[in-house]
Amino acid sequence: MSHPDIIRDIERVSPETVQQARAYQAAILSDVAGRRGTMHGRISPVHHGMSLAGPAFTVEVRPGDNLMIHAAIALARPGDVIVVDGKGDLTAALMGTLMLSACKKLQLGGVVIDGAVRDRLELLELGFPVFSAGFNPAGPTKSVPGRINHPICAGGVSIQPGDLVVGDADGVVVIERQKAPAMLALADRKVADEAARLQAIARGDTASKWLAGALRSAGLLAGDETL
């Protein structure tokens, strides 16, 4: 019988939804989700070309200890994105080339750590998507209990196991598992609207139609005044 702090079986966002999500920027998904679920800007990719999308496999650790991340790697399924609440600690790296090479070999979807990693140059060569709060050459301890697949907070965002996690050059956004399909439908319309706006700008229509109304509401323009 497994320990209650380690939950092995979770309900994941569907593979179809994950595949659809890969088509959208994190910014688009954040917009349609009402700007909710977007991690703090300290969580950024090791390289701007890295991107990920997949169900969250959540891990909580004590600062500077990665015991539970090793356990998570052993339990995660292909496509899972390991999301670690490392408490934003940057005094020691929680993962490096060895662990992340194992993640790549196991075909995991990526790693997001609210904490530090190391071996930056080797990670660039590895090409496995890693998002972290920073880097530190110091290694971690491997002895402190934590939790796997419990609700966590990382990058200032609440994350449930199985939620949709999407990351790109701008950062990471998390969308609740149950809401993900509806958000993707909204994202499709948002992309179409932005494409039409870009075409209008290319024709010389650079004025924002909402701007005058917003300035009037803010008391910066009189009733019939324009910029």
Image (cartoon, rainbow, N blue to C red):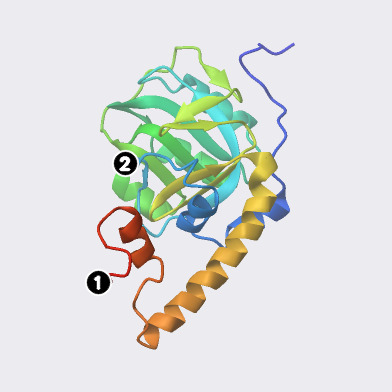
Mark 2 lies on residue: 119
The answer to whether 199 is drawn above or below residue 32 in the figure is: below
User: Residue 155, located in which quarter of the rendered image?
Assistant: top left
Q: Which residue sits furthest front? A: 223
Q: Position of residue 44 (x, y in %)?
A: 36, 46
Secondary element at tag 1: loop
Q: Position of residue 49 (x, y in %)?
A: 40, 60
Q: Which residue sits furthest bottom? A: 203
Q: From the viewer's side, name the closer residue of 217 and 186.
A: 217
Give the mark nearer the N terminus: 2 vs 1.
Answer: 2
Task: Assess whether mark 1 and mark 2 are in contact (beta carbons under 8 angstroms).
Answer: no
The answer to whether 134 is drawn above or below residue 104 in the figure is: above
Structural distance between the alpha carbons of marks 2 and 1 = 52 Å
Q: Crowding near pointer 2: few (<14 within 10 Å), some, many (20+)?
A: some
Q: Which image quarter is the C terminus in?
A: bottom left
Mark 1 lies on residue: 227
Secondary element at tag 2: loop
Q: From the viewer's side, name the closer residue of 61 and 213.
A: 213
Q: From the viewer's side, name the closer residue of 141 and 18.
A: 18
Amino acid type at circle 2 is Asp
Residue at the spot x=37%, y=71% of the render? 208
Q: Position of residue 182 (x, y in %)?
A: 68, 52
Q: Position of residue 39 (x, y in %)?
A: 42, 40
213 left or right, relative to 181: left
User: Residue 41, located in which quarter of the rendered image?
Assistant: top left
The answer to whether 58 is drawn above or below residue 22 in the figure is: above
Mark nearer the viewer, 2 or 1: 1
Q: How many marks on residues?
A: 2
Amino acid type at circle 1 is Leu
Q: Crowding near pointer 1: few (<14 within 10 Å), some, many (20+)?
A: few
